[in-house]
Image (tube, rainbow, N blue to C red):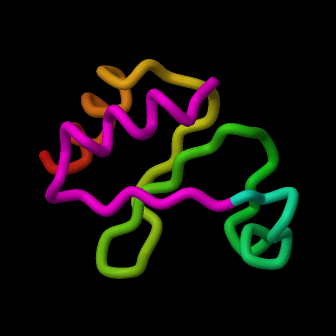
Amino acid sequence: MMAPQFKAAAAQLPQVVFAKIQTDKYEQAAAPYNIRSLPTMVAFKNGREIARQSGALPSDQIVQWVQSLHS
């Protein structure tokens, strides 16, 4: 459900790196980020977490969320 929205948001923001991880398959990679619900988006800047958003969002809201982090 979220994957197409995430992909569409990534296409609208080519200057931003979007990445996905399958937390059920790669639990050790997700564990340090304390992800408890899916989907969860975590924003990083210079390698540090600056924000997180849980729950599915449409692409326009993902774009809006990401853009709000730059202000």
10 horizontally vs 51: left or right = left
Q: Which residues are magenta?
A: 1-21
21 horizontally vs 47: left or right = right
Residue drawn at (44%, 19%), measured in percent from left and top? 58
Residue 15 position within the rendered picture, expressed as x and y whole percent measured from the top left: 15, 58
The answer to which image quadrant residue 2 occupies is top right
When the figure is inspected, residue 27 is found, relative to residue 59, above or below; the finding is below
Residue drawn at (75%, 61%), measured in percent from left and top? 34
Residue 54 position within the rendered picture, expressed as x and y whole percent measured from the top left: 62, 35
When the figure is inspected, residue 38 is found, relative to residue 59, above or below; the finding is below
In the image, residue 42 lies in the stretch drawn in magenta: no
* Between 54 and 16, the one nearer to me in the picture: 16
* Between 41 and 3, the one nearer to me in the picture: 3
The answer to which image quadrant residue 48 occupies is bottom left
* Between 49 and 40, the one nearer to me in the picture: 40
71 horizontally vs 16: left or right = left
Residue 59 position within the rendered picture, expressed as x and y whole percent measured from the top left: 37, 25
The N terminus lies in quadrant = top right
Residue drawn at (50%, 22%), measured in percent from left and top? 57
